[in-house]
Image (spheres, grey):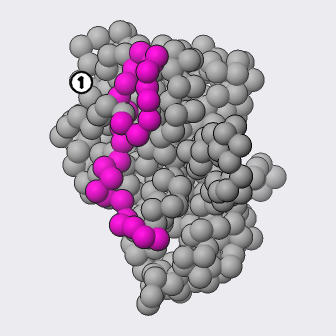
Amino acid sequence: MALAHLSRSSLRPVYVTGLGLVSAAGADVGATWARIAAAQPVVKPVQRFDTHGCECHVAAQVDDRDLLPSPPHARWPRFVRLGQMAFDAALIHAELLGAESRCLDPALPVWCSTTGGGTEYGEECVVRARAGQRGGIIASAIRYQARYLPHKLQEIYGLHGAAVTLSNACASGADLIGTAANLIASGRVERIAAGGAESLSTLLFHGFSCLRALSPTTCRPFSLSRDGLWLGEGAAFVILESEAEVIRRKVTPIARLAGYGQATDLHHIAHPHPQGLALKQALLQAFAQAGVAPEEVAYINTHGTATPANDESEGNAYESIFGDHLARVGLSSIKNMTGHTLGAAGAIEAVMTIEALRRSAPLPAAPVADPLPNLAASLAQSREPRTNGRAFVSTNSGFGGANAALVFLPA
């Protein structure tokens, strides 16, 4: 949703009042932060499906013991089980969960992002069909759809507001949250629950392996010797509210989502523009909406996939925007800890950026022996206490040239 026709002064402030997250690094925000800060390894061999023929055989997987017990959850797609955990935590944090797990705002819109959805059920559907098995095909096809998550959340929590699903490659989560915030800022709605969920599947894993995007060694964002990413799974939700609702409910906001920018470069279906032109445009849009100068940025939670093309492009975009000031901006990527969660990445990383702002402490970058020269000082800066700047930023990029940026300020 573009708001270029509105002046910044005409936009209403948008606040974050609730956070919920589950990742391979932890079952909630605090546990994930602690694991990232301690740089404790989270990847493990994939056992839910066969990785034969792939150069990589590990991924950042959520511990099954952290998932909700069954029944009735056992037959839910895994991305729905993950999403429901994060959604529940966000409602509790925002003081919106009532008796019998019913939301106190029945009209709450539920916005969700994903790329794979319930792919494991799509795979099951194909196997059954090819084997000539009629039973269970319809049920599997229904569970496969991305829209199954918001509709299931509505059913569980007694909601009847708008249900929205957005899929824009790996920028999905950031685009979803930014678009939801703009809807509130324009005065069309007072509150939205926005987030993303993604689970591992045979199709996604083998697809990225065929693209030679998976690391056969170690995920090393912004390293000269980087050789690919690790896939991951997880979910995150934020509760976004207008200032009027924050005052009416007498809740304490966590942060303000002040700016959102989105741009597409159309350079290549799978590779970003080498100079990061669209990412630069998305960042400048977000800064303009937030009323923030580049010199006011303290920290950026980067896309940082550790693929050769992405990290170079991203670094060039930051260098172009910040110039000599880049050395004073903390940069890090958490994908070596959470894995690349695709359609949920923007939501997970937005939540962790908000938590970093709340703590006034950047998420530390994992030390690398051979950092990209133009980012070396910034990666080191992320391991230091915050000393300047007021804006914390989250960026994401995706296939097809999709790029998104979110700017968060203290509430």
Quadrant showing the C terminus: bottom left
Magenta portion: prevailing SS class: loop
Q: Residue 170 appears in which quarter of the rendering?
A: top right
Which stretch did the figure color magenta? 47-72
Residue visible at 75% across and 23% down in the picture: 266
Q: Residue 168 appears in which quarter of the rendering?
A: top right
**With respect to residue 214, does 112 lie above or below?**
below
**With respect to residue 353, does 364 lie above or below?**
above
| 53 in magenta | yes
**With respect to residue 396, does 118 lie above or below?**
below
| 135 in magenta | no
Task: Pick the residue in front: 106 or 288.
Answer: 106
Where does residue 172 sit, x and y in percent of width and height? 61, 44
Q: Please tell me how crowded label 1 is: few (under 14), some (14-19), or many (20+) other residues with Cα within 10 Å.
A: some
**Residue 408 falls left or right of residue 192:** left
Residue 14 visible in the displayed image = no
Name which residue type carries label 1: Pro
- The residue singled out by tag 1 in the image is 367
